[in-house]
Image (spheres, helix red, strand yellow):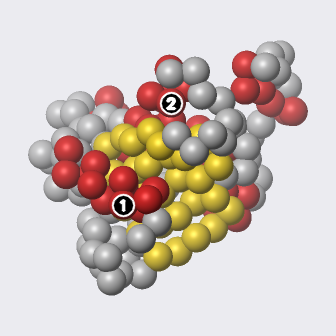
Amino acid sequence: MDRLIWAARQVRQYAYAPYSGFRVGAALETDDGTIITGVNVENASYPLGCCAERAALYTAVGQGYRRFVRIAVVGPGSRPVPPCGGCRQALAEFGDLTVIMATPDETGPIETRGLHELLPHQFGAELGAKEEPHGL
């Protein structure tokens, strides 16, 4: 089994989803092979929650990482769950990652897409941001 999918499946147990029960785990791989995980965290004031993909991304950025290769996302149920639009846009800030969507069950389907396929017309720095992307 791919270690990235394994990490996303393992971390999913720590998701905090008391309102929806929709527990998601994500594992983000850096260009040096480091894996950073994240889970979704809900809040009674729904807009204040955070998706697993962004939790992993923000943790990685906070640790100094800026270059990412792949992200694995594992949600509940028998169908792979793609990142939401907000997570797609947040990830796109750091390039065209490979997105692996898997199920909690090792025998379930796995889908792999390029981020550009999931977010074909992304908003990017080339549209007018003043700083260089990736903080470089």
Residue placed furthest toward the left? 18
**Up/down of 76 relative to 115, above or below:** below
Reading the chain from its start, which is encountered first: label 2 or label 1?
A: 1
Q: Which residue is mark 1?
A: 6
Q: Which residue is mark 2?
A: 60
- x, y percent for residue 123: 74, 40
In screen coordinates, is 126 left or right of 16?
A: right
- For the question of whether residue 72 can be seen, the reply is yes
- How busy is the neighbourhood of tag 2: few (under 14 within 10 Å), some, or many (20 plus)? many
- How busy is the neighbourhood of tag 1: few (under 14 within 10 Å), some, or many (20 plus)? some
Observer-nearest residue: 99 or 10?
10
Observer-nearest residue: 124 or 93?
93
Q: Which residue appears at 28% of the width and 49% of the height? A: 11
Quadrant of residue 23 in the image?
Answer: bottom left
Q: Which residue appears at 85% of the width and 25% of the height? A: 128
Is the N terminus in the top left, top right, bottom left or bottom right quadrant?
bottom left
Identified by mark 1, the residue type is Trp
Q: CA distance from mark 2 to mark 1?
A: 18 Å
> Tag 1, which secondary structure?
helix
Residue placed furthest toward the top? 130
In screen coordinates, is 80 left or right of 21?
A: right
- x, y percent for residue 96: 72, 51
From the viewer's perspective, is the residue at label 2 or at label 1 nearer?
1
